[in-house]
Amino acid sequence: MGAVHLLEHPLIQHKLTYMRNKNTGTKEFRALVQEVAMLMAYEITRDLPLAETSVETPVARARTRVIAGKTLALVPVLRAGLGMVDGILNLIPNAKVGHVGLYRDPETLQPVEYYCKLPLHLEERDVIVVDPMLATGGSASAAITAVRQRGATAVKLMCLVAAPEGVQRVQRDHPQVDIYVAAIDEGLNDHGYIVPGLGDAGDRLFGTR
Ligand code: PRP
Ligand code: URA
């Protein structure tokens, strides 16, 4: 079973409070998503392997370390996942970025894939699927399936707010995937929205509706 990492750093929790507030407008919401994504990226990359190297400092040669292996692949789920990309790239500027386009059918709540473009050599990369909301878990599960079908083996999921139902769905469908979240809320309402959640992340990020 994949582990669930609840990221309770005070800065993350503080910013999440402002994101939840219905009076927070698009500009501020967008900035907060990026800031929280950057802070979460710091936590999610804690276990990246390092390789020994050395550099010449102005004083002497230093034995030191760099991140080993191929650069990470970030895979935002369109469209709301896009809002997290720049924040993560602030910390990991060399990451490759793939895209999985999914929307949730409002009637059935089932994810519908409409786009998929991923970096090469996925099997050699640490892949981080990012989406602010993990509600029923259908979209995240489908996005993880999409990257695994194209060769990814080391996959993590980063979300801002999750419902317990979504966490359970991903754990059931993808038991080898660790989940990183800033909050696990009470549950879902009749429309599949997370309660209390923060509303429709895509609409709040892009100012639609
Ligand atoms: C939202 C969100 C997730 C999905 C979560 O996207 O960004 O992708 O819903 O719901 P689930 O866990 O029940 O699948 P939405 O379908 O609203 O599309 P959008 O990002 O284009 O707004
Ligand atoms: N998608 C969202 O954007 N918000 C929710 O609460 C659930 C799905």
Image (cartoon, rainbow, N blue to C red):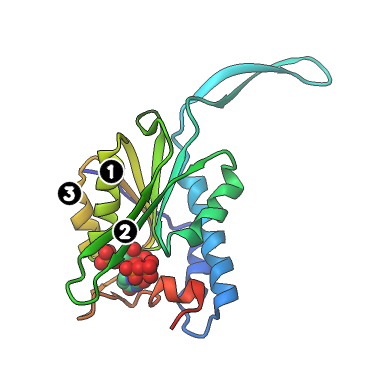
Report how far apart the C-alphas of labels 3 and 2 lie in the structure: 21 Å
Name the amino acid type tagged 3.
Answer: Asp
Q: Which mark is residue 173?
A: 3
Report how far apart the C-alphas of labels 3 and 1 lie in the structure: 9 Å
Residue 192 horizontal side relative to residue 182, left or right = left
Name the amino acid type tagged 2.
Answer: Tyr
Q: Looking at the image, which is closer to me, 157 or 104?
A: 104
Q: Looking at the image, which is closer to me, 90 or 75?
A: 75
At a point 40% along the width and 43% down the height, the residue shown is: 118
Q: Give ligand 2's quarter of the image.
A: bottom left
Quadrant location of the N terminus? Answer: top left
Numbered disc 1: secondary structure: loop
Q: Residues within 10 Å of mark 3 (few under 14, many from 20)?
A: some
Eye-nearest disc, 3 or 2 = 2
Name the amino acid type tagged 1.
Answer: Val
Question: Does the rendering let one see residue 135?
Answer: no
- Kindly indicate the quadrant of the structure image that contains residue 159: bottom left
Residue 51 horizontal side relative to residue 153, left or right = right
